[in-house]
Image: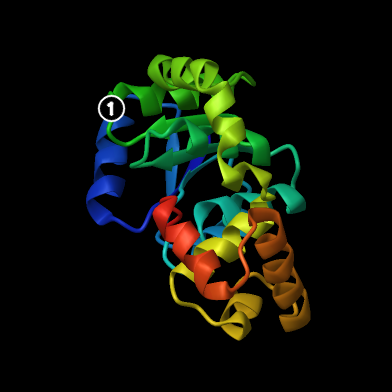
């Protein structure tokens, strides 16, 4: 089983190799950003992709969206420092088969790969419980109104990217990104782009 790990932190990548060292049937492929991850996926067709959410330039969510649009049956596990159930819920929404927190048990990653490799899904028990009991709170979160693509554009806006830069990064037109920004302001009840960015930062969109 070939596993592509997309993470920009060498220490994390090294840790993943160590955790999976006792899994003789796993061959690890590595990428350090979304662009190289997309290239390696297209060339190597790995069985599973483990994708860090907080990648430079575009996020792991956007990379997952692109991979799934290219190959809908791809098995993806999202990997993050954040154990907020909203992030795990977002991962499930975009089509990921698993979610693992970097702050959790190191064996969670190996277990996730084994389960997802068998065609099943995986959430660490603590995160699964958080999602189960946070249902109303997740629904009340204003960001729950946004689509994955809108969330990606919001994340890039909060990172200080211009509309032109965002259009290039998400492979869309300037007009589409500008229209999406306007729709997000309407959905979130804010009037200006500055208020939109402030809301994103306050909500932990990074």
**In the rendered image of this protein, does residue 86 appear above or below residue 126?**
below
Query: Exactly how many numbered labels are in the figure?
Result: 1
Determine whether, in the image, residue 16 is placed left or right of residue 35.
left
Element on which disc 1 rests: loop
Neighbours of disc 1 within 10 Å: few (<14), some (14-19), many (20+):
some
Q: Position of residue 182 (x, y in %)?
A: 71, 70
- Name the residue located 75 percent from the left edge and 52 percent from the top edge: 69
Q: Position of residue 73 (x, y in %)?
A: 73, 37
The quadrant where residue 66 appears: bottom right
Q: Is residue 39 visible?
A: no
The quadrant where residue 96 appears: top right
**In the rendered image of this protein, does residue 98 appear above or below residue 184?**
above
**In the rendered image of this protein, does residue 136 appear above or below residue 203?**
above
- Name the residue located 59 percent from the left edge and 35 percent from the top edge: 140
Q: Residue furthest left?
A: 11
Determine whether, in the image, residue 205 is placed left or right of residue 170.
left
- Name the residue located 29 percent from the left edge and 27 percent from the top edge: 104
Q: Quadrant of the C terminus?
A: bottom left
Name the foreground residue: 143 vs 165: 143
Name the foreground residue: 57 vs 86: 86
- Name the residue located 75 percent from the left edge and 53 percent from the top edge: 70
Q: Position of residue 124 (x, y in %)?
A: 42, 20
Q: Position of residue 137 (x, y in %)?
A: 53, 28
The residue labelled by disc 1 is 106
Q: Is residue 153 visible?
A: yes
The quadrant where residue 160 appears: bottom left
């Amino acid at each position: 089983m070939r596993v592509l790990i997309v993470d920009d932190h060498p220490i994390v990548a090294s840790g993943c190799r160590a955790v999976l060292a006792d899994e003789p049937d796993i061959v690890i492929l590595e990428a350090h950003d979304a662009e190289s991850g997309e290239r390696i996926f297209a060339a190597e067709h790995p069985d599973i992709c483990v994708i860090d959410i907080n990648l430079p330039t575009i996020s792991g969510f956007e990379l997952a969206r692109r991979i799934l649009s290219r190959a809908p049956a791809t098995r993806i596990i999202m990997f993050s420092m954040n154990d907020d159930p909203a992030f795990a819920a977002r991962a499930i929404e975009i089509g990921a088969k698993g979610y693992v927190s970097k702050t959790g048990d190191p064996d969670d990653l190996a277990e996730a790969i084994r389960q997802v490799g068998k065609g099943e899904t995986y959430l660490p028990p603590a995160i699964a419980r958080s999602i189960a009991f946070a249902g109303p709170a997740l629904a009340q979160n204003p960001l729950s109104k946004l689509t994955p693509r809108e969330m990606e554009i919001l994340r890039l806006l909060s990172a200080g990217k211009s509309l032109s830069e965002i259009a290039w990064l998400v492979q869309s037109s300037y007009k589409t990104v500008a229209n999406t920004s306007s729709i997000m302001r309407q959905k979130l009840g804010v009037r200006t782009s500055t208020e939109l960015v402030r809301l994103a930062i306050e909500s932990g969109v990074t």
